[in-house]
Image (spheres, rainbow, N blue to C red):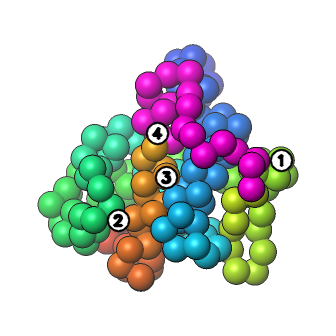
Amino acid sequence: MTAVDLSREERALYNPAFTAVLSARAVQGYDKEYAAPCPLPVAVTAAVMALQPTIRAVLPATTGTGLMGWLDENDAVRVAMTRNAASLAAVVRPGLLFALQSRILHCHSGGLDPVPRALAKTIKGDTEQSVAIQKAAFQLGRWLPSTRSLSTVLTFLGVQP
């Protein structure tokens, strides 16, 4: 996919500023749920999953849903991640770097922390889609580590950390 092939909205979604926000939303979600530094793979995986409409469409309404059971019931998630994870991670990584450089996130040996007041807690956006993607990243940041074994989750998703 080249820049010429992308629509105006897709360019907006795949730019480093927006993917920085997605990574930060995932870290905010993790911080809210666990009050601890967020592992890097959670921030990247949550952003990658949130960018995919087929995954957002089947996300449960709450984080109380069992993640492993949900993955078993939604084979399309595994297919989407197997097909798209590597290329979307290449889009998300510059955004994560941008989030660190612009001090939206702080990285240390324990993981990633949101910088207080650097990004509003209220999720807003120019389009319904950008809001939905941010909300999905936040939810996934809370939910992906719920099994306490991120490597198991990544294996079930068909991706490598």
Residue of label 3:
138
Secondary structure of the residue carrying numbered label 2: helix
The residue that appears at 19% across and 56% down in the rendered structure is 74
Residue 133, numbered label? 4
The residue that appears at 15% across and 60% down in the rendered structure is 73
- Which is nearer the N-term, disc 1 or disc 3? 1
Q: How far apart are marks 1 and 3 (CA)?
A: 20 Å
- Which is nearer the N-term, disc 2 or disc 4? 4
Q: Which amino acid does label 4 sit on?
A: Ile
Q: Where is residue 138 in the image (x, y as percent from the top left)?
A: 49, 52
Q: Is residue 118 magenta?
A: yes
Mark 2 or 4, closer to the camera = 4
Is residue 77 placed above or below 15 in the rendered structure?
Answer: below
Task: Place residue 36 in its image quadrant.
Answer: bottom right
Q: How far apart are marks 2 and 4 (CA)?
A: 19 Å
Is residue 127 placed above or below 85 in the rendered structure?
Answer: above
Residue of label 2:
157
Mark 3 or 4, closer to the camera = 3
Q: How crowded is mark 2: few (under 14 residues within 10 Å), some or many (20 or more)?
A: many
Residue of label 1:
102
Give the residues in magenta.
116-134
- Taking depth in this image into account, of 65 and 107 the one nearest to the observer is 65
